[in-house]
Amino acid sequence: MFDMRLGAMDDNEKERKPGADLFARLSAIQTVVFAIVALFVLAGLMLVGKGFYVKAKDEVAQYLLLRDVEEQDVTGKDSQSGLSEAMPAPLTTGSVTR
């Protein structure tokens, strides 16, 4: 005799994904702990990424500064001489007498 229910259960087992019910198996406290740990991991990855970004930005700035200095040495003139005229004078504060 052939049992139809047994054949149907085999089909459902084949369709079920292995990690689909990960959170269903965890208790509420375990789910909250998992979420907190995931947030800490994400924050750590963001900090590492920011560190790489700052380091790369520093290297580019250093390269540009060295290139500007070399250009000044070769041409003998300041490449930013036009900027000093356009920049306003620094603000001065008056003295306060008591």
Image: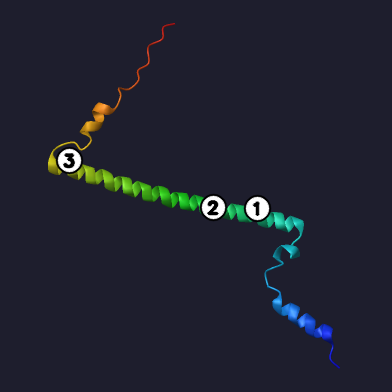
Secondary element at tag 3: helix
Mark sitting earlier along the chain (1/2): 1
Residue contact between numbered discs 3 and 2, judged by CB atoms under 8 Å: no
Which residue type does callout 2 highlight?
Answer: Gly
Compared across the picture, whether 30 is left or right of 2 comes to left
Mark sitting earlier along the chain (1/3): 1
Question: Residue 85 at what x, y percent from top left?
Answer: 24, 27
Classify 45 as above or below 87. below
Compared across the picture, whether 25 is left or right of 78 comes to right
The residue at 61%/52% (across/down) is 39
Q: Which residue is mark 3?
A: 72
Quadrant of the rendering where the N terminus is positioned:
bottom right
Q: Which residue is mark 2?
A: 44
Which residue type does callout 3 highlight?
Answer: Gln
Residue contact between numbered discs 1 and 2, judged by CB atoms under 8 Å: no
Check residue 36 in the rendering and tell me which mark sits there, or answer none.
1
